[in-house]
Image (cartoon, helix red, strand yellow):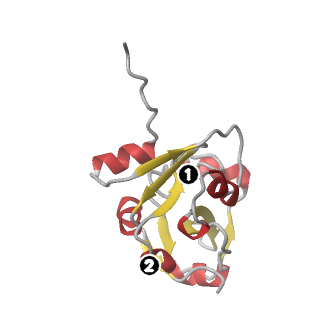
Amino acid sequence: MAKSKETKTNAMRILETKKIPYTAHTYECEEFIDGIQIADMLSLPHEKVYKTLVTQGNSKNYFVFVIPIAEELDMKKAAKSVGEKSVAMLHVKDINAVTGYIRGGCTAIGMKKQYVTRIDIAAKELSQIIVSGGKLGMQLELAPNDLALASGAEFADIIVR
């Protein structure tokens, strides 16, 4: 009898290539739902679940920010952390073209290009965080330092406090 093959996302393949341990959490999902609903559906603590936001700076370069789902990106702190005067959220319709991922499945690991990425400093206090796994219905749980390693990210104070 053939084993059913789990469909691996690009993010999962990258983590495995780098020998970074992770746990995949799956859920039924046909369309975008926000991170808070996902956390509630999977009975995960909100402070452990992070969302990935993509912005564009004055320089027209793209920047990626990973922050707790219930928090808001501080645009001034975010811009300063990447050496820009200002950053603006990327329009939803442009997410796939820029990252290779769709809204709700966007993760800092394995985007089309390696963008400058910042993870909120609060993640360093946690042993594990949960981020999108690269497609709807997939979340990945891993150590914050491992996420930084896999995505080329640095930690910074980037949320409204």
Q: Residue furthest bottom?
A: 161
**Residue 141 falls left or right of residue 39:** left
Figure quadrant of residue 124: bottom left
What residue is drawn where x is 37% and y is 13%?
A: 1
| Residue for badge 2 | 125
Rendered-image quadrant of the C terminus: bottom right
Q: Position of residue 8 (x, y in %)?
A: 43, 37
Figure quadrant of residue 114: bottom left
- Which amino acid lies under the numbered mark 1 shown in the image of this protein? Thr
- Which amino acid lies under the numbered mark 2 shown in the image of this protein? Glu
- Helix or strand or loop: what does disc 1 sit on? helix
Q: Position of residue 86 (x, y in %)?
A: 65, 79
Q: Position of residue 18 (x, y in %)?
A: 28, 52
What residue is drawn where x is 49% and y is 58%?
A: 108
Q: Residue furthest top?
A: 1
Task: Point out the tag, 1 or 2, that comes first from the N-terminus.
Answer: 1
| Residue for badge 1 | 99
Q: Position of residue 142 (x, y in %)?
A: 41, 59
Along the line of sight, the residue nearer the viewer: 141 or 159: 141
**Residue 76 falls left or right of residue 111:** right
Along the line of sight, the residue nearer the viewer: 39 or 118: 39
